[in-house]
Image: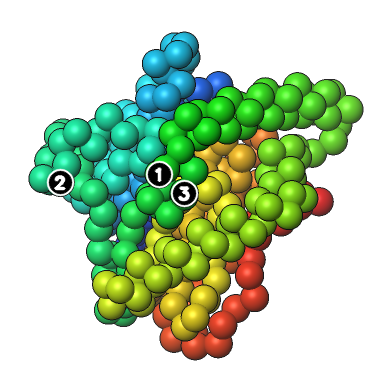
Amino acid sequence: MNVMLSAPPKTHYHALFVSDLHLGTRGCKAELLAAFLARVSCDRLYLVGDIIDGWRLRRSWFWDRHHDEVLRLILKMARRGTDVVYIPGNHDEMMRAWLPMELEVAGVRLCERATHVTATGQTFLVLHGDEFDSVVRYAPLLAVLGDQAYTLALAINHVVNAARRRLGLPYRSLSAWLKRQVKGAVMAIDRFEHAAIAEARKHDADGVICGHIHHPVIRTIDGLLYMNDGDWVESCSALVERTDGTMELLGLAQTLGAPDVSHAFARRSPGRTAAPKPVFMPEPA
């Protein structure tokens, strides 16, 4: 007797926000991202910049089947009715040549920034965020040098974690740990967050959703909500809006190869008014 096994139901969200995939780099966790995308569905998908890493691809080519699978799943979502919005970042700035006009290709809308309206009527400004980074904006050469140092940190991170896996130890992000230890980096993140909130206030929004700095968090700043969806080279995180308007920051299990999209490490319910404590990516157990 033949038994047909049905696929497990997908978790459905009103909106899903991902950024800083850096497809085209060895640091991109494309296999984990594809596993995540295959298990979810949404009414609207926001690609919040640095989706394809043009900086890296101009210097050396890296692309494997997992990168192909990520793009295939995104385009499949667009074909099946998901409103896919692509907001270019600084690493995929070649896409900005088509802006400020909006362009739609294969069901994917390209725009400079967007306004997301939640199920409860809250409005959030959605942008990549590199315009708040003075190094990227005013000193592109320094930005490239910083990118090279970051790439080196990711390469060291790969070697260290390969050794940790052989020893049966869990995954640790070296680059994320370094950012938390450097006082200047912490201060720069704080300045970035406040600049993003100031932009949201200027547009009479309830808050801002961005990426760029690879620092996933939901926090209230000066009465407005700041949400950063993180990245897919360190945190492997995504911001989602549930159908009731609840905003959640989802993370994968910290051990590579063990995705767990049910784990939320930050949440903001639609009716919540008290300012939550700053939430950072937790250290793996």
> What colouring style does the render use?
rainbow
Mark 3 crowd level (few <14, some 14–19, many ≥20, 10 Å Cα): few
User: Which residue corresponds to the image point at 52% horizontal and 76% vertical from the top-left?
Assistant: 220
Image mark for residue 137: 1
Identify the residue position indicated by label 3 in the image. Answer: 134
Side of 169 relative to 229 (left or right)? right
Query: How far from the left and from the top, in percent, is residue 273?
Result: 49, 88
User: Which residue corresponds to the image point at 64% horizontal and 66% vertical from the top-left?
Assistant: 279
Is there any visible trace of residue 116 in the rendered image? Answer: yes
Q: Earlier in the sequence, mark 1 or mark 2?
A: 2
Q: Quadrant of residue 93?
A: top left
User: Which residue corresponds to the image point at 49% horizontal and 81% vertical from the top-left?
Assistant: 222
At mark 3, the secondary structure is helix
Q: Give the residue at the far front of this rendering.
A: 138
User: Which residue corresponds to the image point at 23% horizontal and 37% vertical from the top-left?
Assistant: 96
The residue under label 1 is which amino acid type?
Arg
Mark 2 crowd level (few <14, some 14–19, many ≥20, 10 Å Cα): few
At mark 1, the secondary structure is helix
Image mark for residue 100: 2
The Cα atoms of the two marked residues, 3 and 1, are separated by 5 Å
The residue under label 2 is which amino acid type?
Pro
Query: How far from the left and from the top, in percent, is residue 253?
Result: 66, 46
Name the image quarter holding the N terminus.
top left
